[in-house]
Amino acid sequence: MAIAPVDPSLSKPVPSKPVPATDPGTSPASGTLERLGIRFTAWAERWFPDAFIFVAIAVVIVALGVLANGAPAASVAKSFGDGFWSLIPFTMQMAFVTIGGYVVAVSPPVRALIERMAQVPRTGRGAVGFVAGATMLSSFLSWGLSLIFGGLLVRALARRTDLRMDYRAAGAAAYLGLGATWALGLSSSAAQLQANPASLTKSLLAISGVIPFSETIFLWQSMLIAAILFVVSVAIAYASAPRGATAVTAETLGVDVSRESTDIPPPRQPGEWLEHSPLLTILLVVIAGGWIVQEFTRQSWIVAISNLNTYNLLFLTLGLLLHWRPKRFLVAVSKSVPAIAGILIQYPLYAAISGMLTVPKNAAGASASDAITHAFVNLNTAGTFPLTMGVYSAILGFFVPSGGGKWLLEAPYVLQAANELKVHLGWAVMIYNAAEALPNLINPFWMLPLVGIIGLKARDIVGFSFLQLIVHLPLVLFLLWALAFTLTYHPPVMP
């Protein structure tokens, strides 16, 4: 994943008003959890470096580890360079996931839909639960859409004068798409990568083959986990939200949530006429729509939507149509572009790491990936694999906050271990997906775009998301372990 963009015009904070340190309406237990969350986030905000630092450190550590394994220095250097450029198509595809989700979320029709949705809840607690449900549903379509959509919905609800909603709890609820369900939906980086042979490195393709969506996110076991997490998360968001006089509103926090203008200036020169005319929009949508229709009619819709090219063009075409005028669409795209900087530089480095892990120490020797695979196999059985891998992926996910990039690190040895232990390969992907999302709940890295939109700090919402993590962690691990017994291993399917 990559950070969704923060539009400075969306957040207009004013000087903060003092907020009581202790919320009189909170129980002692929830107060303790909230204080722990605030302390944790305060530490993370001070000491947690940029994600690029983590991947740079990972490159150095892996290179040293591969050298220690006996690989020649020249081979390590060559594998780094070859691997760096091996996933450029996938890198650009993931960048367009961000752009497509953003342009759809900020389009005038979607903004109007958000304003109508904001009139539905009748109570402050109901509003928090409503945000949680809406955000998680949107995350099944696109994690990029989820962050922006959730933030705008929270702001729209906060503008209601007849609703006393705890703004912090609502902000945490808007984050649940990233913290609970995104990796179980259509924009799952690992599932998308494994379903597209052109996006896989040759070494990984030889291990896993192609794993279609029907064997990952569309397994009934995966959809069951998604449904359970949806219900549980909404219930926790609703039950933990302060109500009545104890609710801390946006006004109390000093956040300006007034509706921002999305108007664009009229054309000033004759050459700008086409930028403001829907003529080219209509023609482009017709052409792109013709290709999309062909893709969905010539094959199963599951196969069609699992193709990242189809998925991204669908969102971009929808975004163009919803913005209607090319100028408005281009403004939205330009505001989304800064968010893809991390993808463009970090994903090639993750691909280079994946390449280095497969370098053998000599013509007949094992690679570092093989050594890790053997450790996984020796320490596990088919029954314990889901638990071990789930815990491992969750811990690593806090230090490498990138669903797609981290999968490139784990996939070679995780899927090889799954092959040797006879674990369903698609379920191995879903174990990774469900566990990888867990650290997002307390990782300020992914909170940044959302808190930028709603005008808060990560510390303001992490107390509520930390409470979600306490429940999610044992629940997810149990489901991953229990449902693994309902699946049967199948050998890799080569394209």
Image: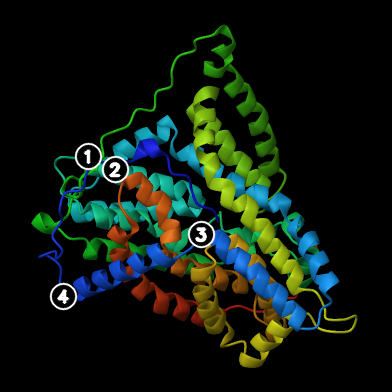
Residue 450 locus on image (x, y percent): 39, 50
Which picture quadrant has residue 9?
A: top left
Q: Measure the C-alpha gap from mark 4 to mark 3.
A: 35 Å
Residue that carries the numbered disc 1 in the rendered image = 159
Q: Is residue 62 above or below residue 56?
A: below
Q: Measure the C-alpha gap from mark 3 to mark 2.
A: 28 Å
Q: Which amino acid does label 2 sit on?
A: Arg
Q: Measure the C-alpha gap from mark 4 to mark 1.
A: 30 Å
Q: Nearer the viewer, residue 320 or 80?
A: 80
Residue 50 is labelled as: 3
User: Is there a contact, CB below 8 Å, between mark 4 and mark 3?
Assistant: no
Residue 4 locus on image (x, y percent): 48, 48
- Residue that lies at the very extreme toward the bottom in this rendered image: 378
Residue 286 as seen in the image, left or right of residue 449: right
Q: What element does badge 4 sit on?
A: helix
Q: Measure the C-alpha gap from mark 1 to mark 2.
A: 6 Å
Question: Who's the residue at 56% across and 63% down the image?
Answer: 53
Mark 3 vs mark 2, foreground winner is: 3
Residue that carries the numbered disc 4 in the rendered image = 28
Residue 172 as seen in the image, left or right of residue 194: left
